[in-house]
Amino acid sequence: MQDSGRIHTIDALRGIALLGILMMNILWFGLPEKTVEDLGVRGEYSGPNFWSWWIIEAFFHGTMRGMFSMLFGASAVLILEKYAKHTGLDSAAEFYFRRLLVLFLFGLFNAYILLWSGDILFTYALAGMFIFPLYRLPVKRLLTIAGIVMALSCLQTTWLHHKPIRLKKAADAALAIDTSITPLTPAQKADIDAWKSFEMEQTLEHKRMTDQDQISRTQGDFMTFFFYSASVTYFLETDFVYNFFFLDAFTFMLIGIALYRLNILSGNRSVRFYLMLCLIGYLIGLPIYFITAANKLNGHFNPYLIALREPVSIHHFGRLGMTLGNIGLLNFLFKIPATSFLKKIMTPVGRMAFTNYLMQSLICTLIFSGFAFGIFNKLQRFELYYVVVIIWIFQIIFSHVWMRMFAIGPFEWLWRSATHWKWQKFERNNT
């Protein structure tokens, strides 16, 4: 299933992952942060808003990004092997790192010009640089390294999520001191203040006030929204990348390389294999996802109560299971005659994934920001998925029309031209 060096199954998977990512991103485009994170802010414990939250949280949370990361790793190997074969490893490495540097700049463009603070290109460029020394390792070593990093990431996530427990223990210890005998030290007073501050931040009143501030900034003029978005981007591309995004992307890229080497991502395994991969992946992932979602509900979205219910965070392993389940299911559907048309529909979307990703940022910024159409916070949670479907339909049609006329997507062409330092071919070769 290959044409001019392309693997259609990988393109189709990439297209589905790209469209699927919007199911998560649309929430952050269209609603304030605390409303997205806590159903209690708007009292969404019943009706379509509640069920849309359950569906996303229990089936899709992070899984499409996981698949996208795996495919990024597989694509890195395809590019390196292609150029190393013709120019040697040194030249291929130079080209590869130049390509990632351009991607890094596009990430900044997406974050600071298209104003999508949840940009992933920045992280992918960084993680992509770190997979280069490892991409030629045998599959067993790749999976071993990925497993070790994922285990460490789970420990790191557990440590971060258990911070409220540590805050309360420190505050309780300070409050237990008889101040008539022993005065509190500045550190002990700080421990009490930190816990009180945390408790205050978890009240619905405080969350609604925080959301209202975000609403006023997002619905303001261009410069108001720009400075707010830039501040969020700075946090996400520093603290959040270090604590979560980098290790997450790096791990899934390594797994993606291994899956490519095992001919799993390219669709070259049997129908039975993909069905078993689907079943095993979901048997691992679904229970973890349902438990995680239930803990959020039962803990009333309070990080302290949630942490008490989760001694160890194993969400990363659940996401891996769900992602593998999705890959198995999609490849199974691609091979069944009744549903094989899905691959044909999604292949052009995947070939233009870079353009479509940036297009999603542009479209959503214009739809929701105050300096354009300004419908931020004006749709309910479930209504945002009407917007998602409309964007999906548009991007599928646009991708098919564009790829009939041109050999490459517009931003793919710009990315390739900047990487090669010369203009690349744009037209289709009809000979």
Image (spheres, grey):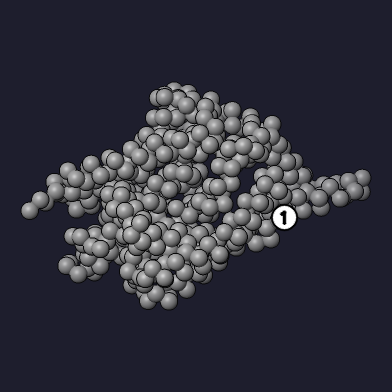
Give coordinates of residue 103: x percent, y percent.
32, 50
**Which residue position holds label 1?**
308
Give coordinates of residue 291: x percent, y percent.
64, 56
> In the structure shown, which secondary structural element does the residue marked by tag 1 occupy?
helix
Examine the rendering and report whether any part of residue 110 can be seen.
Answer: no
Give coordinates of residue 324: x percent, y percent.
46, 63
Residue at the image point whose x is 51% and y is 34% from the top: 383
In this view, 138 is above or below 151 = below
Examine the rendering and report whether any part of residue 119 can be seen.
Answer: yes
Residue at the image point whose x is 45% and y is 25% from the top: 374
Q: Residue furthest front?
A: 338
Q: Which image quarter holds the N terminus?
A: bottom left
Q: Which residue lies furthest to the left in this view?
A: 431
Return the residue nearer the eye: 317 or 304: 317
Is 60 on the left or on the right of 331, as rendered? Answer: right
Q: What amino acid type should be assigned to the residue bearing mark 1?
A: Leu
**Which quadrant of the figure has residue 93?**
bottom left
